[in-house]
Image (tube, helix red, strand yellow):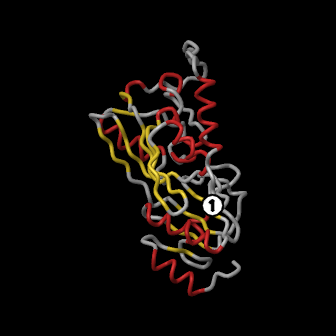
Amino acid sequence: MVGVNQKSIDELRARLRGPLLVPGDSEYETSRTVWNAMIDRRPALVARCLGIADVATGLRFAREYGLPVSIKGGGHNVAGLATCDEGLMLDMSLMRGVWVDPQARTARAQAGCLLGDVDRETQVHGLATALGFISNTGIAGLTLGGGFGYLTRRSGWTSDNLSAVDLVRGYALVACNDEAERAVVGAVGLGSDLVAEPLHPASERLPVSLAPEMDPVPDLTGRPQRIAHIQQAVENVHIGHPLKILA
């Protein structure tokens, strides 16, 4: 890391609420590891974020020193985009809080949550949302990729059920509450909190079947305009330093 000395690392560690790991630390190997065991990248620094402030602090540091940044949600991306060599990894795996509002049928989940974390909390209220098939997949990467699962044919993709995102862009927190703004999350891949809406009765979960009965083809009227609206929002995003997508 050119220009990064021990003093600057110590100052970063003091500004973070979560731990900052370097090679040789006891938790470093576990934190840098991703699902695809063929990926063996070694970040120079791993910030195990505990909140939005840690994410913003890490981005500020990376921008100041020109470091590549990767973000680890569930770490399931097969290409290993959650990690990088000689850069800063923002590890979200300690941010796994889920808060459910059963009256509004919404759930707020932090970016390090796995599908099982969300299911566990929503099912207390007999509710569920459209997620994937594997419980230890991260919700952030799943949502950014669209998200297909048991409820998809009835309730849409995971991204269709996303109503709001707290997005850390540069130094600031930006609340994304409409469709165009949420498209920005797909462009930068740094949502710190996600709100799923609506939640559905858990009894609506579709049974696993090798040949399930097909539902009618959904009405796609207006879909081209929707896609064009999202593309325009993405084109308006400007980022000072390239980021890798959440995984």
User: Which quarter of the figure has residue 6?
Assistant: bottom right
Residue 147 x, y percent position in the rendering:
56, 36
Q: Nearer the viewer, residue 141 or 208?
A: 141
Residue 12 x, y percent position in the rendering:
51, 77
Element at label 1: strand
Query: Mark 1 packing: few (<14 Cα in 10 Å), some, or many (20+)?
Result: many
Kindly give the residue lying farthest to the left in the view shown.
Answer: 103
Whether residue 247 can be seen here: no
Whether residue 64 can be seen here: yes
> Amino acid type of disc 1?
Ser
Q: Nearer the viewer, residue 75 or 168?
A: 168
Kindly give the residue lying farthest to the bottom in the view shown.
Answer: 7
Which residue is rendered at x = 67% and y = 55% of the image?
81
Residue 195 x, y percent position in the rendering:
42, 42
Tell me if residue 230 comes above or below residue 16 in the rendering.
above
User: Which quarter of the figure has residue 89?
Assistant: bottom right
Which residue is rendered at x = 66% and y = 70% of the image?
67
Q: Nearer the viewer, residue 162 or 112?
A: 162
Q: How many numbered callouts?
A: 1
Tell whether 176 sits left or right of 141: left
Which residue is rendered at x = 44% and y = 49% of the image?
175
Q: Nearer the viewer, residue 61 or 160?
A: 61
User: Which quarter of the figure has residue 226?
Assistant: top right
| Residue ID for mark 1 | 70
Tell me if residue 201 comes above or below residue 163 in the rendering.
above
Which residue is rendered at x = 57% and y = 17% of the image?
221
Tell whether 228 sits left or right of 190: right
Kindly give the residue lying farthest to the right in the view shown.
Answer: 38
